Image: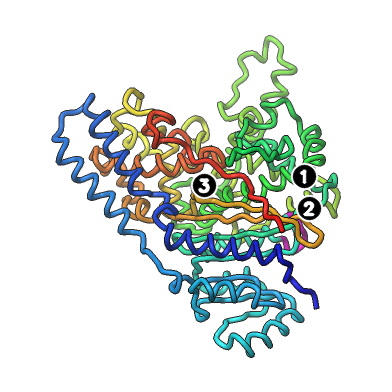
Amino acid sequence: MKTYKQDIKQKSRLDIWKTAIERLTTQSEKSRILESNYLKNLIDFCWKDTLNLAFNYNENDLLRNGYNWVQEISDSYKPKKANELKIAFFCGPEPENDLDILLSLDIKIENIWAFEIDNNSYATALNKAKESYPKLKILPGSIGDFFKTTHHTFDIIYLDFISSLLTKPSPPIGVINSVFDNQALSDLGVLIVNSCEPDANEDNAKFLASYFMNHEMIESSVLEATNDDDDDFSYFTESPTSHGYDLQSLEKIIKCNISGAYSAFSTSYVMHYASMISPTIRFLQNNSLRKQLFNEKKAEVTATFAEIESTDFFKSLISMDDKDEESFFSPISGNRFMDNESYPFWNFIDSLNGSGKSVSSYFKTFFNQSKEGVSILNAAQFRESFHSMLTGADKLLSQRMLNAIPKIMKAIPDARGGLFCDIPLPHLWLEVALNQLGAPYHSNVKMHKRWKYKAKVRTMHTDLFVFDRCRGFYESMPMIDQYETILTDIEEQIFARCCIDIIGKQCRWPIPKLYYGSNLICINDSDWSNFAELRKREIIKE
């Protein structure tokens, strides 16, 4: 029987489980994105230092109301003890490896669900459970299928894969997606993903290069070997195109640096999917929700997306003569190429080309598969077009949204700037409306932790994600039709903008397009207003 009882594996298990439980118990206040101290500081900044330049008001009353609102947000979180946490994990043939640690950390056996897809490993694990852990719930089959057919939610989910995330078929990425698509994680929860580093071959390098090529910000480890200096935090740099790389040259860099690129991908993909793609899929799959925001006329939507990815504009520039000078082109014509960093996931999927058995070819099909009429590509197209929906791509929006947005903007006191760091452009309110109903999982970057260790043969990469759905914020907002009414109340408007400020600051580096331009206070204007930084991987040694 294959064993997983290596010393370094047990050492990693103890650190991982201990950290995960602490994030939701003794460190739960820090794990909240809508953190009380930060929100109080923002309330003070708005009413004491900024809005008094434009309005007359009773400062004490507004501060008191603001602090009461912060308390309401805090009360929306429900603290838990270790013995209240519900756990799901892959058990393999040796469930005792994890169970003994969990039980020593005060997790109740009744709250633990173990999954094993291999029949022989399941039979071995079941016999051990009958003998030593009779109350353990151990299930044969796919954890992803379990999420699809049940309504269980877990506080901690540990996906301990024995392959890389680039594996096909039955890709681990599909299991990760199912956690978010089926809302299997608690509103404040921890997802742990462990996978092995892939081979440094052309196939894997091409896939990773396609992923990173159009991202506005990437971890520097994608372009250079990771260093072991004393800096605890990972450095983010501009896109590969900003550094002068094309897809082929980026492939070559990544092939020589597969460890650094895979490390960045293991973190980036999960954060991006949880915050941007999955909530959009969920929203689009519900027709009654979809028509709240988006145009019901499929032909107009299809034509708009075709315009965004049209190359006619470039062909015209190349062949332009005097009679073509007055040719009309939509302001969104060719946007996906001219503004490529605004469409990272759409461009990623489109660029996945290769032979029939290649990783890129497999995942191109995977990302184009429709579930309930919506594919991952569809979600990326809608989500990444938000910024242009009021500057040429208006046919993507429903008429009610086209009517509501100007009224919302009229209610914003600094719609032309002058008070706060950023001007709250219309796309922010579209994002709030979608997220309110799509229910994203936002990553708490400050509390994210990563490890790397050498198993028997392969190098393993482990990410511990802390996700917060920020329900206290989204549930406090009315429906989009009433935004203009609620936002004319300056207090309510400040409450909403405080929340998107703090969510935006959490994800500024790994997901820069999420609530882009939402800052009330600028970075470095105060010692408490910095963007969250992502820690480097911690090396676990024997």
Earlier-in-chain disc, 1 versus 3: 1
Q: Is residue 206 magenta?
A: no
State whether residue 258 is above or below residue 130: above
Region of the chain picked out in magenta, as a range:
166-171
Bin the neighbour count of mark 2 within 10 Å (Cα to Cα): few under 14, some 14-19, many 20 and up: some
Q: Residue 412 sits in which quadrant?
A: top left
Q: Residue 216 sits in which quadrant?
A: top right
> Which element is circle 1 on?
helix
Earlier-in-chain disc, 3 versus 2: 2
Instruction: Say which mark, if any, is on residue 445.
Output: 3
**Residue 91 in view here:** yes
Earlier-in-chain disc, 1 versus 2: 2
Instruction: Say which mark, if any, is on residue 258.
Output: 1
> Which element is circle 2 on?
loop
Bin the neighbour count of mark 3 within 10 Å (Cα to Cα): few under 14, some 14-19, many 20 and up: many
Q: Is residue 170 magenta?
A: yes
Cα separation, mark 1 vs mark 2, equals: 8 Å
Instruction: Say which mark, if any, is on residue 198.
Output: 2
> Which element is circle 3 on?
helix
Q: Amino acid at mark 2?
A: Pro
